[in-house]
Every structure is written in structure tokens, then in C-alpha cells.
Amino acid sequence: MRYDILLWDVDGTLMDFKRAEAKALSQSLEEVGVTPTEKLLTEYSRINLSYWKRLETGELTKEEVLLGRFVEFFDKMGIEADAEPFLMRYEGHLGHTWFIQDDSLELCKKLQEEGVRQYVVTNGWVDVQKTKLHESGFDEIMDGSFISDEFGVPKPKKEFFEVCFEQIFGMKTPSSEELSRILIIGDSLTSDMKGGINARIDRCWYNIAGEANEDNVPVNYEIKNLWQIREILKDGV
């Protein structure tokens, strides 16, 4: 087996984040008297994604992302609501709203039985992510979880992965041989794949939508279904 350590992204990879986002936002809007139309859900999703990408580049802090996306969303869509309590309402719903993608829980169980060490690497809010991982059962399978909110450095920064490696190997800068054992799997080119490049580990892009890699971010593998990981682990090609 070429890789015996996997780093899994959560939102958009192990779990269907877009579906969870739409449900949590719909619930939150209804509770403040706003009908959750498709236009509202689509526009929020666009704004939210843009804010998280600006976090990845260091343009915004986590605090600016969490609140700022709702300030902009309310202003643009003419919604009269206080962003801060709405944020807490939304994140509360989001923590209890999760949809497993590609039967990934069963996949991770099988990999665990085969001796593969597995870790979560995510930029999500710590309370939300820990709740989802616990309620879904992933926390019982994973060997550990690395949530950027806990140590203040987001993917794709090298420092994020140094925290991971220190806990996995006992050192921030493992040898090339040790790094060759690791594969990161995620749906984001800017967060997961560029993070893998910064960490000097191999990368598997989960491209379920068949999107174009317009920036030509180097990846080692590209898959459309998470179960294809088993073939990668078996063949290493």
C-alpha cells in the first residue's frame, strides 16, 4: 500500500456541504421571517465561498469571514436582520445538519479495518465541525482531527500542516520518506490541493462536478467518487 495515512477534508468531501448549507440557511431565514427562495440560497452560497477563499489567501481573518458574509448578504438582498445573532442561529443549525457523501462513512470504516490511519483536516468553525463529526460517527473512525479554528492557521498554509505532522509524527518537518506515506483528499484546489503542495505531500482532487482546473494546480490524482481511493491505495498509480 503506497499511502497508509490519509488527510480528509470534511465539507464538500466527506460530507455534502452545499446541501447542508442550504438546509441550515433555510431554517435560519424562516426563523427571522424571511422566505428562503432559491435566489437567496444561491447568492448566499456565492458570497460565503468568496469569503472562505479570502481566508485561505490571508486577506481576511476567521472572525471577518464568519460575520462579514452575512453583513454583505443582508445588505445586498435587502434583508433586515442583525448579522451577529443570525450567525449564531445559522451555525447552530449547521452543526446538526450533515449529509454523508458517497457513503464515505462506510468507506472510512473499511479503510480503518485495513490499517489505514485517517485524519480530518478542515477550516470550519470548531464547535460546528466537532458536532458534525460526533453526530455522524466520523470521530469514532478518525485517528484525529485538525480544525484550523483551534490553532488559528487555515489551510492551505504550511503552518497548518506542521501542526498536523507534529501530532502524527512528533515533528513539524518529517522526512521525505514519511511525507510520501500521506495523501490528502479534498474538493478544493485552493485549500486542499495547494495545501498539499505547501505540505509537500501527494494530493487527490475530489472533483465530483467535473470542474476545469483553470489555474493548473498540480494534483497527483483526480476522482469523482470517493471509493476510487481504494484503487489508488491498492495500486499507487
Image: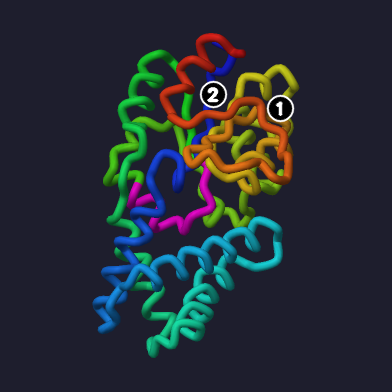
Picture coordinates of residue 21, whole percent (x, y)? 38, 59
What stretch of residues is rendered in magenta? 121-132
Picture coordinates of residue 145, whole percent (x, y)? 47, 41
Mark 1 — residue? 174
Residue type, label 1? Pro
Q: Earlier in the sequence, mark 2 or mark 1?
A: 2
Picture coordinates of residue 129, whole percent (x, y)? 41, 52
Mark 2 — residue? 5
Quadrant in which the N terminus is drawn: top right
Q: Residue at x 29, y 55 (%)?
A: 97
Label 2 element class: strand
Label 1 element class: loop
Marks 2/1: CA–CA distance: 13 Å
Q: Nearer the viewer, mark 2 or mark 1?
A: 2
Q: Is residue 68 magenta?
A: no
Q: Where 186 falls versus 53 (above or below)?
A: above
Q: Please tell me in which quadrant of the rendered image residue 141 appears.
A: top left
Q: Where 233 falls versus 207 (above or below)?
A: above
Q: Residue at x 57, y 34 (%)?
A: 205
Quadrant in which the C terminus is drawn: top right
Q: Where 179 falls versus 65 (above or below)?
A: above
Q: Please tell me in which quadrant of the rendered image residue 78 appears.
A: bottom left
Q: Residue at x 43, y 30 (%)?
A: 225
Q: Is residue 127 magenta?
A: yes
Q: Residue at x 69, y 42 (%)?
A: 194
- Give the left or right position of residue 41, taking residue 46 as reference: left
Q: Please tell me in which quadrant of the rendered image residue 100 appears.
A: top left
Residue type, label 2? Ile
- Mark 2, other Cα within 10 Å: few <14 / some 14–19 / many ≥20: many
